[in-house]
Structures are given as C-alpha cells and as structure tokens.
C-alpha cells in the first residue's frame, strides 16, 4: 500500500511536477536529483493540462524514479496507468458539483481498471493574495486566510466523511503561503493527515509550516525554478527526526 508506506516518514515533502511546464527531456535529470533526496515522492498534475501527452509524461517519470508517483489531478482526464496512486479528491472548499462528485464518477472506472491506489483526499483552497489557476478553472472561491473557523468546519466535514488526507492549497504561483496560525488551529482539532502546498519558496516558510503541524508540504514552482531547493527541504526534514 503506497499510502501506508508514505505515512511511516512524517514529516515529509513532495515535489509537484506540472506536465504543462516541464519538458520531457528534462525529466531524467530531475528524477536523478529526487532519487537521492529525502522526498516522500512526486505529485503529477496541473489545473488545466495543455499537453496531450499526460500518460506518456507519467510513464517517463515512473521509469526514472525510485519513489512513489502520485497523480494530483485537475480533472478526470488526468488518470494514468503508470501511476502508483492518485489523490481521489473532493473540492471541499467549493460548491461546484462537478468537483464534488461529477469528476470523481468519471475517473473511478479508470482508476479501478488500471489498479491505481486511490487516496481519499479533501482539497481545500485557501486565499493566497491573487486569483490562482485552480480557483479560475474550478469556478470556486477560496476560504479567506483570516477565517480559521470556516477552514476547521470544512476539514472536520472531510474527516467525518472518512477522508484520509486534508490538502490545504494556496494554489500554483500563490503570492502568500498558508498562514501558520491556520495550520496550528486546524491541527489541534483534526485527526487525519495534513498536507500543505502553494507559495512555499524558501527554507524559512517550509520550516514554519511543518513546525505548525503540516505532516507533508508540497513544493511546485520553486522546484521547477531552482532544483537545488531539494537540499534545503532535506535539511528541514532532518530537523524533525
């Protein structure tokens, strides 16, 4: 079980690979760096998906990595037979029925057919200072960053629905990461695993988020711009063991 094996090393971090922003020829060298790192695995996905070769992208990633490959889907069209697992997500912070059940129904038969491990995930979008791609594409409003009570209600609803993971995301290219105080408040009240992403660009922010209670953090744009950030993330993870 992919998820059970990942839970053995908390806290940790994942690297998010966007097929729309990474060239196929770059994958091998990127995976070489990830293979020798303490990363828990990689997430593959994007809000839009302009590339027609999602399946091929995942295949090449899988062939060159020794860590779990997990799909972080922007929709039911982002399912690949080559992935180890998929975040089977409900957009808890939204009210768009397509992302509450519509996309899940479309994706479920493919996940079953390809025997991909589903990880039941409650995805919660948090206000980041500007409109992000996921906010625009999902046609939903993020939770205000100064409303921890609203966040808690959504996260508890996800926990009571039996979800295994709550993913707080400020969105790709976010101006601001999620406030540490929001994470501290949430972590005191929920029992499920907490993942945090969006706007994490440096060691200081990453350390604050893990110290506040994030079980896993997700590094996306920062890794694509500076692959050496892996070394900083390894140093932070080591601090908590």
Image (cartoon, rainbow, N blue to C red):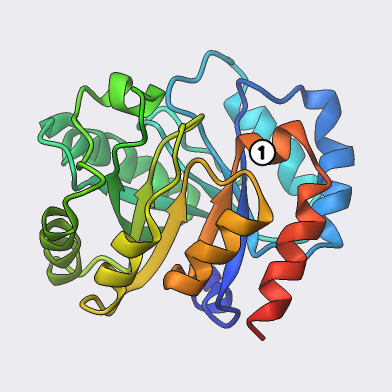
Residue 192 appears in the rendering: yes
Quadrant in which residue 171 is drawn: top left
Question: In front here: 51 or 165?
Answer: 165
Q: Quadrant of the C terminus?
A: bottom right
Residue 112 appears in the rendering: no
Residue 154: percent from left, percent from top: 14, 56
- Is 80 rendered above or below residue 8? above
Instruction: Please give left or right for residue 61 compared with residue 18 in the image.
Output: right
Residue 239: percent from left, percent from top: 69, 79
Residue drawn at the location 19% of the way across and 31% of the way down: 141
- Is 152 rendered above or below residue 75? below
Label 1: how many Cα within 10 Å (few below 14, some 14–19, many 20+):
many
Residue under label 1: 222
Residue 229: percent from left, percent from top: 76, 49
Residue 12: percent from left, percent from top: 60, 69
Instruction: Please give left or right for residue 10 compared with residue 32 in the image.
Output: left
Question: In front here: 52 or 149?
Answer: 149
Quadrant in which residue 127 is drawn: top left
Quadrant in which residue 191 is drawn: bottom left
Q: Residue furthest bottom?
A: 241
Residue drawn at the location 63% of the way across and 81% of the way down: 240
Instruction: Please give left or right for residue 156 compared with residue 106 in the image.
Output: left
């Amino acid at each position: 079980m992919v998820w059970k094996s990942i839970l053995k090393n908390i806290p940790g971090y994942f690297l998010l690979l966007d097929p729309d922003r990474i060239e196929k020829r770059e994958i091998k060298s990127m995976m070489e760096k990830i293979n020798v790192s303490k990363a828990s695995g990689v997430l593959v996905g994007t809000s839009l998906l302009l590339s027609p070769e999602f399946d091929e992208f995942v295949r090449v990633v899988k062939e060159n990595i020794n860590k779990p490959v997990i799909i972080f889907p922007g929709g039911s069209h982002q399912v690949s037979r080559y992935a180890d697992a998929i975040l089977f997500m409900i957009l808890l912070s939204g009210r768009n029925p397509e992302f509450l059940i519509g996309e899940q129904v479309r994706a479920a038969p493919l996940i079953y057919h390809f025997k991909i491990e589903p990880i039941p995930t409650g995805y919660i979008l948090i206000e980041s200072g500007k409109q992000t791609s996921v906010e625009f594409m999902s046609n939903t409003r993020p939770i205000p960053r100064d409303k921890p009570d609203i966040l808690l209600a959504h996260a508890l609803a996800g926990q009571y629905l039996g979800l295994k993971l709550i993913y707080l995301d400020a969105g790709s290219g976010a101006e601001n990461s999620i406030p540490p105080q929001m994470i501290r408040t949430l972590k005191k009240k929920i029992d499920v695993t907490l993942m945090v992403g969006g706007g994490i660009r440096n060691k200081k922010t990453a350390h604050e988020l893990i110290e506040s209670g994030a079980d896993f953090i997700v590094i996306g744009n920062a890794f694509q711009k500076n692959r050496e950030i892996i070394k900083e993330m390894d140093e932070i993870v080591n601090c908590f063991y």
